[in-house]
Amino acid sequence: MKQHASLPDDSAAPPAPRAEREGGQRQALRALLPHLWPKGSVELKARIVVAVTCLVLAKLATVYVPLVYKGAVDALTQPGGPASAVVPMLVVPLALLFAYGLLRVTSTAFGELRDAIFAKVGQRAARRVALEVFRHLHTLALAFHLDRRTGGLSRALDRGTKGVETLLSFLLFNIVPMLVEIPLVCAILWALYDWRFAAVTFLTIGGYIVYTLAVTEWRMKHRRAMNEMDNEANTKIVDSLLNYETVKYFGNEVHEERRLDAALSRYERAAVLTRTSLSALNLGQATIIAVGVTFIMLMAAQGVVEGAMTVGDFVLVNAYLVQLYLPLNFLGVAYREIKQSLTDLEVLAGLKSLRATVADAPGAPALEVAGGEIVFDRVTFGYDERRPILDGVNFTVPAGRKLAIVGASGAGKSTVGRLLFRFYDATSGAIRIDGQDVRALTQESVRAAIGVVPQDTVLFNDTIHYNIAYGRPDASAAEIEQAARLARIHDFILDLPDGYRTRVGERGLKLSGGEKQRVAIARTILKNPPILLFDEATSSLDSATERDIQESLKAISSDRTTIVIAHRLSTVVDADEIIVIEDGRVAERGRHGPLLQQGGRYAELWRRQQESTPETDARDANAPNPEPPNPARALAVEPAR
Ligand SMILES: Nc1ncnc2c1ncn2[C@@H]1O[C@H](COP(=O)(O)OP(=O)(O)OP(=O)(O)O)[C@@H](O)[C@H]1O
Ligand SMILES: [Mg+2]
């Protein structure tokens, strides 16, 4: 009755109040039920029926084995039985022995068949749950994802889907069969002999189960502590090695060792407790079974002595008890796995119950783009209600025109873009595209109409080709190259040893900032939307490349509504309207010429940018994330053309 001392059980889920936890687990269990009878799939249902049939057949075979065994023993020990050596007499035990062997194989065969047939049901359920949650995660607002650690999310998803499978198979193939077999065996014993045999069997197995569950529950605490300590020690090691240099600078090796040893000693204590308690569990289980078996054999022996039972009966009752408890060895592990799976599923259910803060209104229509006129009507917004970012922003971009937004770093320029794209909803006021309030439309249709080149481009860890094609996955290679040419990156790509098949690394980090931006521009060109939003789209480029791209962008955006956010004012002089955002409001607006004449904030920014030298330009242009403290430099550079 050994259980594996080292079965993986990382209980990383945060502890919740007990009552709440159990309510959540019940809910998690209920969410699982539909997968036991998957709607719409005849094949899966058939598999479940066949698997359950196999289960029943396997159990019947198992329960029948001791009966045949008894028959064989009786035949062999019959007075004047095989000893008489008459051939026909030998046939009976032989047939019984073969039947015994056959039954054992049958029992195993049906058991394995059941697992094989059910595998697809379990895996399909896991796949469905994973996909459902994944889809749901994509519906949640940007705000949710900014607050989360993605690694934690994918781990929760992973564990939750494994949990679905574990639960289905453990419940269906460990717990339910056990619940069937115990009463069945008790009934057979009662029918064959008398109620006392049934009662002793029932009490022994019942006691075994209660004891195992109770001790396992208690042990789980230590296991969890052990895992926590393990994590802690690991974190210490990694942290210390990462800070190798710092440790050396301060000569703190001994201090580090002491810290690690403290964590290791806590782990040691927890691990020893876990192992000792496992021995206690195993010993207790063995004692309970030994007492039960002894009792049963005493009663059977008495029956044999009194002549009421045969030796075969003696063997039979013993065999039943042993056969019942053997699979129960696994009970402690099954219990722990089930509880763990329930916790994982609960985390998953928690994720699924999150409501998107930006959601489509029921029956929302799709956006119908006529020309692409954009109106911000007294828009007020803050990421946190205690800190307003936009305060009554008004502007209109007529269809096909170009609006430039300028302002200091942190003024809320990118926020305007996020609101238009509906990553967030405005607190008050309205945003309209061709007269339709974006909040009343489907997010999908609004987003399909807008092409965004974001301020910080992140690429998929795949090839350049894949990343550009992401703008329109069905685009042909020629279209992709054309987009790359317009974004002035085609020649660069051809120069790479692997060309378009070059992999860009995690988040695109193998490309320079300017190269990433051009990939982002190419994929937006490929998307070919009626509305364009460039958020510092060329900020990481040198002036020559920037000028080239500006030509392309001008050509692309000539007949589309365009919003350009820029620090370098020279890139927006041709805008139909320029707005300066300051303190969450539009401080100034107008075309470049009149704004300069006005001599206000814009003119001031312009003058300062004119003062900076071309050398500053080149340096800033190559910095991937220019973030100078001084607004004059923040709004640097490039002389007027
Ligand atoms: N998700 C967020 N949660 C809370 N605050 C945010 C969030 N995103 C941005 N902010 C804050 O909102 C303000 C405006 O941000 P925004 O990105 O719109 O600035 P910006 O004008 O684009 O600046 P930059 O020129 O540096 O890109 C900033 O002060 C920023 O700290
Ligand atoms: Mg920004």
Image (cartoon, rainbow, N blue to C red):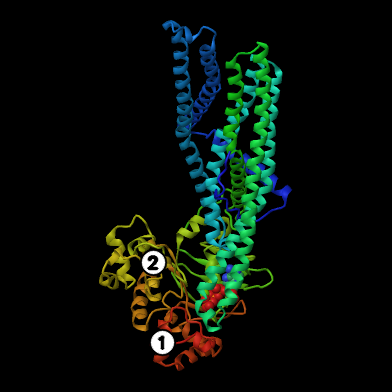
Residue 428: quarter of image = bottom right
Residue at the spot of label 2? 505
Circle 1 packing at 10 Å, graded few (<14), some (14-19), many (20+), is few
* Residue 557 sits above or below residue 208 on the image: below
Image coordinates for residue 155, horizontal then vertical, percent: 53, 55
Image quadrant occupied by the C terminus: bottom left
Q: Amino acid at mark 2?
A: Gly
Residue at the spot of label 1? 619
Is the Cβ of the residue at disc 1 closer than 8 Å to that at disc 2? Answer: no
> In 3D space, how far apart are the residues under numbered discs 1 and 2 (Cα atoms)?
25 Å
Q: Nearer the viewer, residue 206 or 337?
A: 206
Q: Amino acid at mark 1?
A: Arg
* Residue 405 sits above or below residue 445 on the image: below
Answer whether residue 369 is visible to the viewer in this image: no
- What secondary structure is marked by label 1? helix
Q: Nearer the viewer, residue 94 or 484?
A: 94
Q: Which of marks 2 and 1 precedes in the sequence?
A: 2
Image quadrant occupied by the N terminus: top right
Answer whether residue 281 is visible to the viewer in this image: yes
Residue 358: quarter of image = bottom right
Image coordinates for residue 64, horizontal then vertical, percent: 54, 19
Query: Residue placed at 63% from the left, 45% from the top?
Result: 279
Query: Residue placed at 29% from the left, 65% from the top?
Result: 500
- What secondary structure is marked by label 2? loop
Q: Nearer the viewer, residue 596 or 627?
A: 627
Image coordinates for residue 562, horizontal then vertical, percent: 45, 70
Residue 553: quarter of image = bottom left
Image coordinates for residue 59, horizontal then vertical, percent: 54, 25
**How many numbered circles does the render carry?**
2
